[in-house]
Image: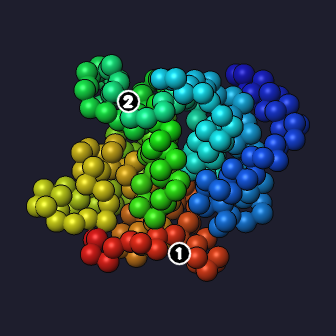
Amino acid sequence: MFGWLTDLRRKWILEHPFPESWDGLLERNITHWEHLGPDERTYLRELVQVFVAEKNWEGCGGLELTDEIRVTIAGLACLLVLGMDHVLYRNVESILVYPSTVVPPSRMSGHRGALTVEMSSVPIAGEAMLGGPVLLVWDAVKHDTVHPERGHNVVFHEFAHKLDMLDGLVDGTPPLATREQHARWVEVCTREFRELRQRSSAGQSTFLDAYGATNVGEFFAVATEQFFGRPVDMSHRHSDLYGVLREFYRQDPAMRVALCGGDASPHSSASDE
């Protein structure tokens, strides 16, 4: 109903020049930046500019927000939706950023449409709340940008959750375009999730982080981390899973790396399965 207002506001935002210093931040903190083509970089800049302006940013625990914090988080979040038809995370209004690991007083969780509140005493590096904000720890975000070879990325992880939540569920299946795509997704992800659970329970090494065996929602978030973090390895070791993620995100990070003659995972272990 109010789409025209959103379009008008975003047009106004984009009439302002993209800050020159932000280019350096994207180049330094977004590993994929060097693999993007000119048109992709231009579009990512636009998404970042709108994302930074539209979202409510709050520094918590004494953290003073800076351009580096906003632009880094925005760049990583927007990279996920670079190839998709989307409304730029309509289910994210606020982003809360803490300086270091935090113990949340409570967390909202959802399964099959039901909301529950869970008390937690476990320190976290990030959290995506169903119907609520995204919480991120800047130390963890920065560490992931300095060590991209690990494949872990808390921003990818939490914003993958938000994509999963677009249909109001946390079920590891984001909104998909067709019945055929949905059927293929369920087939592949169910098989891969069960295999990860079996291998994790047996204490065997796995390519995907064992945390993905917690539930199907975490599986999708962990798979997203590796899809963007170690795409070449993932395309070889989990080709079917890579394929359904490539179709959903409408991006092929492994191909980008190949075309650039680079290696997105120079320190990956050959023993991972």
Residue 168 occupies quadrant? top left
Residue 90 on image: x %, y %: 59, 31
Q: Give the left or right position of residue 24, taking residue 198 as reference.
A: right
Asked if residue 105 can be seen in this view, the reply is yes
Report crowding for label 1: few under 14, some 14 to 19, many 20 or more residues within 10 A (C-alpha): some
At 87% across and 41% down in the image, what residue appears? 17
Which residue position holds label 1? 263
Q: Give the left or right position of residue 238, taking residue 94 as reference.
A: left
Report crowding for label 2: few under 14, some 14 to 19, many 20 or more residues within 10 A (C-alpha): some
At 78% across and 47% down in the image, what residue appears? 21
Residue 212 on image: x %, y %: 29, 51
73 up-or-down from 28: above or below? above
Three-letter residue code for mark 1: Asp
Three-letter residue code for mark 2: Val
Q: In the structure shown, which secondary structural element does the residue marked by tag 1 occupy? A: loop
At 33% across and 19% down in the image, what residue appears? 105
First in sequence, mark 1 or 2: give its number: 2
Nearer the camera: disc 1 or disc 2 = 2
Q: Nearer the viewer, residue 269 or 194?
A: 269
Which residue position holds label 2? 102
Residue 1 occupies quadrant? top right
Residue 126 on image: x %, y %: 42, 36
Residue 125 occupies quadrant? top left
